[in-house]
Amino acid sequence: MTADGTLETTPAALEVHDVHKWYGAHRVLDGIDLTVRPGEVTVVIGPSGSGKSTLLRVINHLEKPEAGHVSVGGELIGVRRGSGGRLRELSERALLAQRSRIGFVFQNFNLFPHLTVLDNVAAAPVATGRLARPEARERARELLTRVGLGDRTDAYPRQLSGGQQQRVAIARALALRPGIILFDEPTSALDPELVGEVLSVIKDLATSGTTLVIVTHEIAFAREVADRIVFIDGGRIVEQGPPREVLDTPRHARTRDFLAKVL
Amino acid sequence: MSEPPGAAVSLAEAPLADTPSKPPAAQRVQPLRRPGRWIATAAVLVVVAQILHGLATNPFYQWDRFRYWFLRPAVLDGLLVTLEVAALSAVLGLLGGVLLALARQSGSPVLSAVSWTYTWLFRSVPLIVVLIFLYNFSALYKTLSLGIPFGPAFVTFDESKLATDMTVAVVGLSLNEAAYAAEVVRGGVLSVDQGQHEAAAALGLPRGYQFTRIVLPQALRSITPNYVNQLIGLVKSTSLVFYVSLLDLFGSVQTMGSTYPGDIVPLLLVATVWYLILTSAVSVVQFYVERYFARGATRTLPPTPLQKARAGLAALRARAGREAAV
């Protein structure tokens, strides 16, 4: 956990600046500003359709924002500053290199079904030229053991339960040693009895000092791991602060309404 | 880190697996009698027997002449040409199809439109027309040259030397095949879940790797049966190369037939049986290719015919054992 009075000398782990996103005529994000310090665990909550998932997808540039920009570790994502300060689109190769430094865990796991669990985790470090194959497999084995799946390395994803698949997906994201990991509703597709095993893996990451941004509906979990809770509604950040403030004494009526529904 | 639940195996269940699979006779259900099915089966068997009897005994088929021709060098040479044309066109057609499918999916409207137009054109024009057109191509363009577009040429080929009958046949079939293969490949790529593209992009996998290692292997699962269908059509289409004076299997049979008019029927049977063999070979390959690409898509792989036969034998033996015991 980070102390509240961190000095501003190190660049923010994540900085979202005035991001707007439209799907056709529908406004999804309406001027989001967000700063996340290194090691901080930020949990984003809000009603469905409020733009939570879109925000995460804009951060690693799976969606291009119509206005505003995102930087991770002080580096602009998907764009660069050209001469005269104008933003220019980054080459695909450079963007892919940036994405490999941002972990992303999907709601539906999106594991590669034709690869074994071990290859799912080992593929990216090899493909991006970070590690040679033997080292990548060795590291994949370590990570799978860390998420409690050291004995299922040769299985194919469809032979695993949802909870196990999501843990593999987390190991796959960790294999690239990302500076920040984004979780998009990591437990929403799971049977209730499998939620705990995934949350405990995320909790483990949170306490180890990894910077995390988690979109979730698990309010109890949010209270436990979050350094900060961000409540989004209608594409805007309505309020943010430590869990005790936002969850127990929300200032805004919309936050109170939402919490009354989900708690 | 918590251990996954359900790792411990209940010991109480273990002995069950060892008990012999012999249900008590009283519990076995008497199967329903189905007289209609028996009558239909008998009727079909009679018809099949009639056809087989006719094939075997009708002197018109001249099976002795069939035996004489089946492995003649002239026929085997033709078979070789058929195989060569089919194999080359299958590979070139698939490559062209992949390129066309990629172009169709690309962000460039020009590439996409060119790909669409190509597919439209070659799916519309009969193969025989394409082949004969190419056969007369050297009349339209005397030379082919490699150089700067609309500028000076570096290398010049004499068309009449370049365009052998084999080249014309392979090029014609490949052009036609590519148009169909493009649609097959495109359909396969579309069948891959959008989440797979996103996961590959989110991991920052290089573009080429995303296509060749993540998307294509999954697409091949639906591409294979469709492309094999296409391939079987291609094997049969090779018979058209006879019209650009290439002596394939059909061509050599046809030529022999005009020299030995009395042997036309056995010669056609020779061609028929060889085409059957080729198609069957393709189907066997298809089974194993599909099984290979099913890895991970199904929890257990379908059994191979050998495994099925073994399992069937084992079941028969078990049943015989049971009945002997009763």
Image (cartoon, coloured by chain):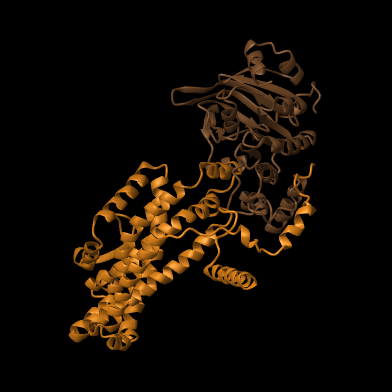
Chain colours: A brown, B orange
- Give the residue drawn at x 76%, y 50%: A142
Q: From the viewer's perspective, tell me whether residue B13 is left or right of residue B159.
A: right
Frontmost residue, A29 versus B283? B283
At which x and y percent is residue B264? 22, 81
Q: From the viewer's perspective, tell me whether residue A245 is left or right of residue B312.
A: right
The image quadrant where one finds the C terminus of chain A is top right
- Give the residue drawn at x 37%, y 66%: B41
At which x and y percent is residue B32? 48, 58
Frontmost residue, A139 versus B69? B69
The image quadrant where one finds the N terminus of chain A is top right
Q: From the viewer's perspective, tell me whether residue B307 is left or right of residue A196.
A: left
Decide: is B69 above or below B309.
Answer: below
Q: From the viewer's perspective, tell me whether residue B243 is left or right of residue A181.
A: left
Residue A165 in view of the camera = yes
Residue B93 in view of the camera = no
At which x and y percent is residue A61? 56, 35
